[in-house]
Image (tube, grey):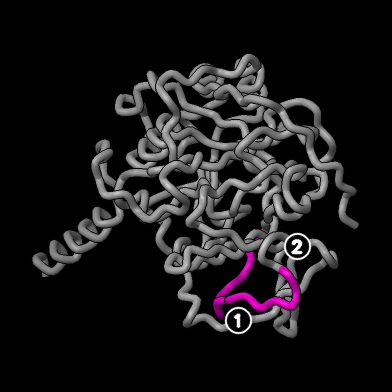
């Protein structure tokens, strides 16, 4: 019986260890799947000679005033459904707002819908459907399913994952909707997510997406392509971080000697190397983890919503974060609030 108890204990320990991320830097590890080209802003490291924005100190002060940095996982995140298009049944998706849809979402339309697809509660109704083979992504916001099985969306768009994940500004696109996405910044939903396989391999080879309460709605900066915060129900704002701004954790911050967990260190390295683009507005400072049913089943033991919070405090962020030079501020699209 004693041997049986030992065997059970060892089995449990091995199972726990098998989920634990690597403890050390694995920068030479094989890169997990990532969307977009290598020269995409999402996949390009921040140059070592990059300069801070002239307003970086004030912008980071505003960020820090919103509190510690958390990770949205099972609430207010982005469910991602990885599919094989040839094996996934298609279904019509209808618009809440007639005529309001993005590139590739023209009517009549049917898109691949996994049988287990569902929105998070609570959430903004974001859903990303990704076919890695065809490198296509179908994005929805305000998505909901009626009692009779009909899917509705506030805005839908199709994106190619073989491109840079960046689209022309709204005032240079054929129509403003061609520059828009499910996010108010115009970013594809899959961009900047923390993915299960990345934590398992010990390396996030791309920039992350960050959201914060104090976000400007009157301008945006590249690589964002629009600023539709008011359309999402947020009050107009003329101060704070613009959508598209790139934040960076100070490369001199000693990650290995910090109190971060192994998972936290993986995320911190990505914030040093690639940074995080401002893509949305939220009620707190948050990053986003992929949150489909399969990923939610994998996250326990790998990632928690407060993985970073104790170390990435307001004081720490005010001292060790900066905003990379944002370049030219572009005017937001003048849009009416949706009914």
Tag 1's secondary structure?
strand
Q: Is residue 87 visible?
A: yes
Where is residue 89, by image quadrant?
bottom right
Question: Alpha-carbon distance for marks 1 and 2?
Answer: 18 Å
**Relative to 245, does residue 60 appear above or below in the rendering?**
above
Compared across the picture, whether 120 is left or right of 201 comes to: right
* Neighbours of disc 2 within 10 Å: few (<14), some (14-19), many (20+): many
Q: Quadrant of the N terminus?
A: bottom left
Q: Quadrant of the C terminus?
A: bottom right
**Relative to 78, does residue 247 appear above or below in the rendering?**
above
Q: Residue at x 17, y 60 (%)?
A: 10
Magenta stretch, overall SS: loop
Which residue position holds label 1?
A: 90
Range covered by the magenta-colored residues:
106-121
Magenta stretch: includes residue 286: no
Compared across the picture, whether 301 is left or right of 151 comes to: left
**Relative to 144, does residue 46 appear above or below in the rendering?**
above
**Relative to 165, does residue 104 appear above or below in the rendering?**
below
User: Percent x, y for residue 21?
Assistant: 30, 48
Q: Residue at x 35, y 27 (%)?
A: 255
Tag 2's secondary structure?
loop
- In the image, 213 versus 165, the foreground residue is 165
Q: Residue at x 40, y 22 (%)?
A: 48
Which residue position holds label 2?
A: 101
* Neighbours of disc 1 within 10 Å: few (<14), some (14-19), many (20+): some
- In the image, 168 versus 184, the foreground residue is 168
Q: Is residue 282 visible?
A: no
User: Percent x, y for residue 137?
Assistant: 55, 63
* Mark 1 or mark 2: whose residue is earlier in sequence: 1
User: Percent x, y for residue 165?
Assistant: 55, 49
User: Percent x, y for residue 63?
Assistant: 63, 27
Compared across the picture, whether 107 is left or right of 91 comes to: right
């Amino acid at each position: 019986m004693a041997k049986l108890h030992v065997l059970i204990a060892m089995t449990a320990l091995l199972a726990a260890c098998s989920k634990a991320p690597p403890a050390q830097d694995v920068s030479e590890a094989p890169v997990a799947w990532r969307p977009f080209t290598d020269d995409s802003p999402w996949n390009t490291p921040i140059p070592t000679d990059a300069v801070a924005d002239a307003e970086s100190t004030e912008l980071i002060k505003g960020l820090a005033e919103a509190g510690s940095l958390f990770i949205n996982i099972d609430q207010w995140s982005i469910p991602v459904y990885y599919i094989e298009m040839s094996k996934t049944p298609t279904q019509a998706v209808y618009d809440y707002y007639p005529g309001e849809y993005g590139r590739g979402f023209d009517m009549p339309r049917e898109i691949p819908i996994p049988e287990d697809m569902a929105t998070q509660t609570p959430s903004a109704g974001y859903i990303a459907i990704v076919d890695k083979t065809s490198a296509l992504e179908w994005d929805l916001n305000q998505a909901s399913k009626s009692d009779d099985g009909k899917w509705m969306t506030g805005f839908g768009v199709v994106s190619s994952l073989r491109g840079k994940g960046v689209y022309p500004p709204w005032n240079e696109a054929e129509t403003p909707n061609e520059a828009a996405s499910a996010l108010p910044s115009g970013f594809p939903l899959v961009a900047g997510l923390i993915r299960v396989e990345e934590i398992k391999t010990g390396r996030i080879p791309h920039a992350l997406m960050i959201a914060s309460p104090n976000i400007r709605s009157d301008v945006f900066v590249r690589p964002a392509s629009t600023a539709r915060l008011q359309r999402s129900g947020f009050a107009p704002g003329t101060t704070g971080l613009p959508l598209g701004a790139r934040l960076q954790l100070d490369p001199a911050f000693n990650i290995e000697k910090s109190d971060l967990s192994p998972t936290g260190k993986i995320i911190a390295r990505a914030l040093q190397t690639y940074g995080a683009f401002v893509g949305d507005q939220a009620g707190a400072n948050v990053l986003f983890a992929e949150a489909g049913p399969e990923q939610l089943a994998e996250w326990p033991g790998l990632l928690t919503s407060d993985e970073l919070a104790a170390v990435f405090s307001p004081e720490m962020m005010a001292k060790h974060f900066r905003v990379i030079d944002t370049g030219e501020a572009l005017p937001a699209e003048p849009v009416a609030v949706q009914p």
